[in-house]
Image: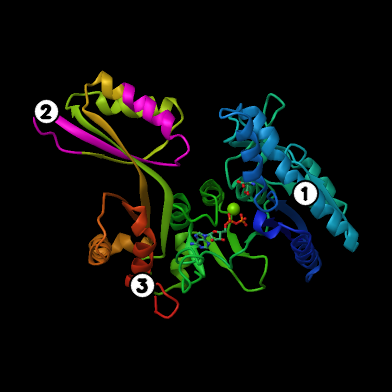
Amino acid sequence: MPLVIMKFGGSSLSDASKMKLVASRIIAKKNIGNKNKVVVVVSAPGDVTDELLEMANKITSNPPGREIDVLLATGEMISISLLAMTINSIGEKAVSLTGPQAGILADINYTRARVKKINPKKINSLLSKNNIVIVAGFQALNSKGDITTLGRGGSDLTAVVLAAKLKADLCEIYSDVEGVYTTDPRLVKDAKKLEYISYDEMLEMAGSGAQVLQSRSVEVAKKFCVEIHARSTFSKNHGTIITNEKKIRRKKMEEPLISGITFDKNQIKFTIVDLPDIPGVAAKIFGSLAKIGINVDMIIQSAAVNKKNDISFTVSGRKEVKKMQRELDKIALEFKASQVVCDEHVAKISIVGIGMKSNAGVAGKMFEIIYKNGINIEMISTSEIKISCIVNEMNMVKAVKELHKGFGLSKREAV
Ligand code: ADP
Ligand code: ASP
Ligand code: MG
């Protein structure tokens, strides 16, 4: 009997009527054709995770990771129990399992644990008794016996690791959009749904702001060749298949130049001015930031003039500005830099596409579109299939819309 993983995000579980709709889709999937075994993964309802974090922040600005994980794990537990009740009330058998009960084991990093192993005994036993198994996403058990969480958006990861371990025939990730679009359809109304997208492109899109899938889940899907079908809870339409590049190549005659455009407003830019041009400065700055848990994104070092240079870098996430500022002030003092400048009004826009590999001139076209709209580029970074620019956050929406149009990604344009 085929095995299907169905993952439903918080936006699909925010009230009882949505729960009922989700339950009916699960039951329909179970009873289709020769019948399926179904494992369901769910997120916390609506914005519950954010609300729980706010509750913690009202108590302390520095809550212990262990307790945050205990708190956040309760969100997904609301969903599993309510969904199991809903399915049972319709007359099908469903059993809820927390991450630890489902045998999901992780390392000891609280709030960002990595899945180490899965012991699927309990899931398999319940499936063999004809149950729909409903697993709480985003949570696991560590070797100390503590509950941990897998990073924001981590229910996607739970779905993918279970699909890999249980050798599922299908891994469907349901949300409030019909799939992966050329850009966020909430921002650009004529964004186009992609039929396919490669793991690498999806990774770059997820890593640069497209919230629709968690990047680690895509990393794991690529590693274990789990094909993902991203689709909508609220429509029967086919969504987007996330799969390997070769398979997509076989289906398409020609690669589009650009598959998607992403944006991230949650950026902050620091510049340390007049650093001495001597070995070890960059190592000290970025080593110190790493020690306090700050992940740096783009870095630019200017050429030295009079044995001095500036280093600018961006960080994704504006929550820990004060902590970063304190650390950088210490470094500036140590190296006698003249000042540390912090700009919280920047945004990152990126274009992503495997077509870029074989086409020169994509970067030039991107910069030209931005320039023609009177927007200044503050920083640039590139990878093989992505180009990112930092601009003033005021210009972000305009830049995204113009790039989307300029690269011919709108519904009306042929790609
Ligand atoms: P869920 O609650 O189901 O986990 P998310 O909110 O995490 O769903 O992800 C879905 C959201 O991702 C959509 O509502 C959409 O606004 C956003 N999104 C951003 N970029 C894209 C994109 N390129 N394609 C589709 N959705 C996107
Ligand atoms: N509830 C968690 C979050 O909001 C996990 C998830 O939704 O995937 O990040
Ligand atoms: Mg999500």
| Amino acid type of the residue that numbered disc 1 sits on in the rendered structure | Ile
Q: Is disc 3 in contact with disc 1, using a CB cutoff of under 8 Å?
A: no
Position of the C terminus by quadrant: bottom left
Question: Which numbered disc flags the more N-terminal residue, 1 or 2?
Answer: 1
Q: Which residue is mark 2?
A: 307
Left or right side of 103 for 64 = left
Residue 321 appears anywhere in the view = yes
Residue at image coords 77%, 64%: 17
Residue 52 magenta: no
Q: Magenta part of the protein: which range?
A: 302-330
Q: Position of residue 21 (x, y in %)?
A: 76, 65
What label does residue 405 carry, if any?
3
Q: Position of residue 60 (x, y in %)?
A: 60, 28
| Kind of element beneath mark 3 | helix
Q: Judge the density around disc 1: few (<14), some (14-19), many (≥20) Cα neighbours within 10 Å.
A: many
| Kind of element beneath mark 2 | loop
Question: Which numbered disc flags the more N-terminal residue, 3 or 2?
Answer: 2
Residue at image coords 57%, 41%: 151
**Residue placed furthest toward the left:** 306
Label 3 near ligand 1 (CB < 8 Å):
no
Q: Which residue is mark 1?
A: 80
Residue 316 magenta: yes
Q: CA distance from mark 3 to mark 1?
A: 42 Å
Question: Which numbered disc flags the more N-terminal residue, 3 or 1?
Answer: 1
* Rendered-image quarter of ligand 1: bottom right
| Kind of element beneath mark 1 | helix
